Amino acid sequence: MKIKEIQEEIVDEFSMFDDWMERYEYIIELGKKLPLIKEEFKTENNLIKGCQSKVWLQGEQTDDKIVFTADSDAILTKGIIAILIRTFSNQKASDILEADMGFIDEIGLKEHLSPTRANGLVSMIKNIKMYALAFNAQN
């Protein structure tokens, strides 16, 4: 699936919920299904700066696509990074760099997070884009 299609799917899923408590519960459920990062990648280098909780992100290029894995010590943050990984993992670096991030606003995520969590979300996106930039430069 293309990034835009995945984003539209996520927007549709979030539109099924009537209130934000249900959406938070859904985000937490997504976090529980997140494929865990290998322990060897839970390093200081993979720790995302700017997050209130600890979030590790690892990206590896496989063929012409980037595969991301992640983990967090906070259940809500784990769900947020799960949404981002679902969107950007197994995508080409150039597609990640060109991706529109409007779906985050469409699902209302940023406005329903505390300021520190919203900053963490921005940091997560920035790190994903940095991986894409690095891998794109190698190609």
Image: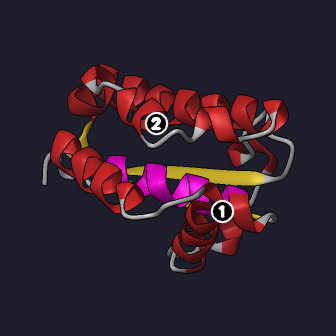
Taking the magenta stretch, the answer to whether it contains residue 87 is yes
Q: Residue at x 45, y 28 (%)?
A: 129
Circle 1: is it few (<14), some (14-19), or many (20+) Cα within 10 Å? Answer: many
**For the residues bearing labels 2 and 1, Cβ distance under 8 angstroms:** no
Please report the residue visible at 62 percent of the width from the left and 71 percent of the height from the top. 25
Residue 82 % position (x, y): 51, 60
Residue 85, by quadrant, is bottom left
Task: Tell me which amino acid carries mark 2.
Answer: Ile
Dot 2 or dot 1: first in sequence order is 1
User: In the image, residue 5 lies at what x, y percent?
Assistant: 16, 47
Residue type pointed to by label 1: Lys
| In the image, residue 89 lies in the stretch drawn in magenta | no
Residue 78 image label: 1
Q: Toward which corner of the image does residue 106 lie, by quadrant?
A: top left
Say which residue appears at 71% left-offset and 33% top-offset.
118
Instruction: Examine the rendering and report whether any part of residue 46 can be seen.
Output: yes
Q: What are the residue bounds of the magenta stretch? A: 77-88
Q: Quadrant of residue 23?
A: bottom right
Question: Height in image: 125 above or below 71?
Answer: above
Task: Label 1: state its secondary structure.
Answer: helix
Instruction: Pick the residue in front: 12 or 59.
Output: 12
- Quarter of the image with the C terminus in it: top left
- Location of residue 39 in the rendering, given as x and y in whole percent from the top left corner: 70, 73
